[in-house]
Amino acid sequence: MLRLMPNDHAHLNGVLALTRRRLVQGASALAVAVRYGSRRAWARVASNTAVAGPASATTTLTVNGQTHRLSMDARVTLLDLLRERLLLTGTKKGCDHGQCGACTVLINGGRQLSCLSLAAMHDGDRITTVEGLASDQGLHPVQAAFLKHDGFQCGYCTSGQICSSVGMLKEWRRGDPSLVTENLDDDHPKLTEAELHERMAGNICRCSAYLNIADALREAARETA
């Protein structure tokens, strides 16, 4: 299957930005150039196929407590900004299609997939990655529980699992229902096996360390309830 690289996408977007008039002009010049080999015609081809530059954006983000004012291509995802500009590589790029959860971060306290979010959309937002969960007092309770129960194998999904778990426990503590919550009038649904699985369904572990992850989350839920 043909897979376009990032530079190919940029070029394609630029080509699509051509106006119909310029496209017709370019096609006409190309026909003349091919037919007669005229240098002037080839120059017109080059002129009419010149692509427009990408739009830029300036955004202020507070990442793990540190404020950054950044200028960037408006199409840059939050995931790429975190990894490539701020060098916070704890957030992983898995499927890059919002299906595996490896890129989950906390935005203003709520969990979100950073691969499906443009950085320019988060001006003024507070973002927490796995690097920002621990404090001077030690690991976050969820991080400590993952270590205690060996909630990882290869570790690639772990940062997304941990960030998602922190957000999930916050949702559960404030009484947000899930798709399997039976009593919607219950202000504090029990974190049953079904509830736990449903609430973490967006995070996939290819090593299938789910049993240990579930044990870690039960302990973290008890400690932070």
Image: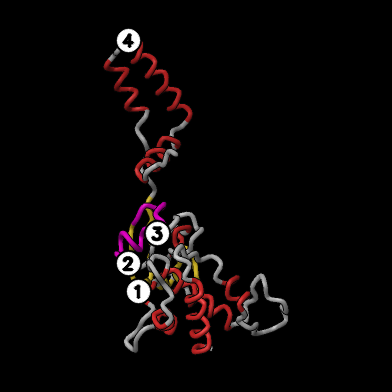
| Colouring style | secondary structure
Dot 3 amino acid type = Lys
Nearer-N-terminus badge (2/3): 2
> Which of the pair 135/69 is nearer the observer?
135
Image side of residue 88 versus residue 198, left or right: left
The residue that mark 3 highlights is 93
Point out the tag, 4 or 3, that comes first from the N-terminus.
4
Quote the CA–CA distance across marks 4 and 2.
Answer: 55 Å
- Look at the image and give the residue range highlighted in magenta: 72-88
Task: Residue 100 in the image: state x and y as whole percent.
Answer: 48, 61
Dot 1 or dot 4: first in sequence order is 4
- For the residue marked with disc 2, what is the amino acid? Leu
Q: Quote the CA–CA distance across marks 1 and 3.
A: 15 Å
Q: Position of residue 145 (x, y in %)?
A: 43, 82
Q: Is residue 107 visible?
A: no
Mark 4 or 2: in front is: 2
Residue that badge 4 annotates: 36
* Local secondary structure at mark 3: loop
Q: CA distance from mark 2 to mark 3?
A: 12 Å
Q: Is residue 13 left or right of residue 221?
A: left
**What residue lies at 64% left-to-right and 73% top-to-bottom?**
178
Say which residue label 1 marks.
131
Task: Tell me what residue is drawn at x 33 percent, y 68 percent.
Answer: 68
Decide whether residue 83 is among the magenta residues. yes
Q: Amino acid at mark 1?
A: Glu
- Residue under pointer 2: 88
Dot placed on the residue nearer the N-terminal end, 2 or 1: 2
Q: Position of residue 138 (x, y in %)?
A: 34, 86
Residue at 32% from the left image edge and 17% from the top image edge: 41
Give the structural element (helix, strand or loop) at label 4: helix
From the image, which quarter does the C terminus lie in? bottom right
